Amino acid sequence: MDVKNKVALVTGGGTGIGRATSLALAERGAIVAVNYSRSQTDAEETVQLIQDRGGQAIAIRADVSRDSEVRDMVYEIVRQYGSVDLLVNNASTTRHIPFGDLEAADEEVWNELYDVNVKGMFYCARAVAPFMKQKKEGAIVNLGSIAGQTGLGSSLPYAVSKAAVHGLTKSLAHALAPTIRVNCVVPGAVATRWWAGYEEQMKKLAPNLLLQRIAAPDDIAQLICTALEQEAMTGQIITVDSGQTM
């Protein structure tokens, strides 16, 4: 799929991988809706970066864990641009909890992580699907994590939520075929603000990776764009982790 002049919604699009993806899509000529929940300033900065480079973009607020807000967001994008052709389900959250501390993984934590990381991706996919089907084409990329493959990560609930994202991808690929392709990009460690306070740990990790480097947000963004463009692929879980899981 040629993404030029296509309308792309990037959730959590103002920072990190989301910002890099928003910029990469805009460079390819897509019109980008940069979603945010709390990071309004970051989202507006991302929009300004796109506009300064001659692209089209808007910042649009919605908490992806709330179905009504997701639907309102999608309707507003469609009102302005006529459709949503591409969806990047990037918005995620975590809690840093030692794996052995099972009591700290309480109901509130489980609900928060599943509401955003899993249900939020489903809500967004469900909201855009009718418009993609109407145009008889569409592409969705979910952001997973190697935590969902290894069972390790920032917390046990986070790892399990990302494993669920991988499963959601395959189920949505079945549910939305043949009109809409759904794939999942699975990053390992990426140099974003998620590592705030853990920079020394990241520096120690890099030499132990096969490629001896921590991925940059743009590394992930380029693969996301490729997955959106590739018309012969759906239901795939694609890992990009500098060899971290080898």
Image: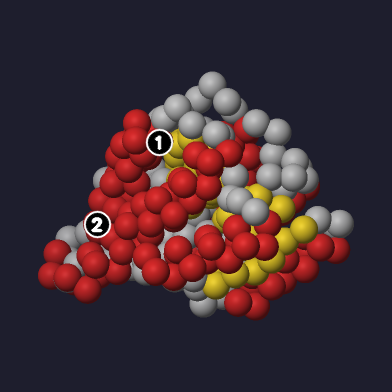
Residue at the spot x=37%, y=65% of the render? 67
Q: Hey, which residue is sitting farthest top in the picture?
A: 232
**What type is the residue that disc 1 sits on?**
Leu
For disc 2, the marked residue is 156
Residue at the spot x=86%, y=57% of the render? 54
Q: Is residue 79 above or below residue 219?
A: below
Q: Position of residue 41 (x, y in %)?
A: 65, 78
On the question of residue 193 being in view, the answer is: no
Q: Is residue 240 above or below residue 214?
A: above
- Label located before the other in sequence (2 or 1): 2
**What type is the residue that disc 2 sits on?**
Leu
Residue at the spot x=68%, y=45% of the render? 6
Q: Residues within 10 Å of mark 1 (few under 14, many from 20)?
A: some
Badge 1 marks a residue whose secondary structure is: helix
The answer to the question of whether label 2 and label 1 lie on touching residues, with beta carbons closer than 8 A, is no
Task: Give the mark toward the camera: 2 or 1.
Answer: 1
**Where, by quadrant of the figure, is residue 78 drawn?**
bottom right
Badge 2 marks a residue whose secondary structure is: helix
Left or right, 47 with respect to 167, comes to: right
For disc 1, the marked residue is 176
Marks 2/1: CA–CA distance? 30 Å
Left or right, 123 with respect to 58, comes to: left
Left or right, 234 with respect to 224, comes to: left
Left or right, 182 with respect to 6, comes to: left
Residue at the spot x=33%, y=68% of the render? 95
Q: Position of residue 133 (x, y in %)?
A: 50, 39
Q: Position of residue 101 (x, y in %)?
A: 17, 66
Q: Is residue 6 above or below residue 57?
A: above
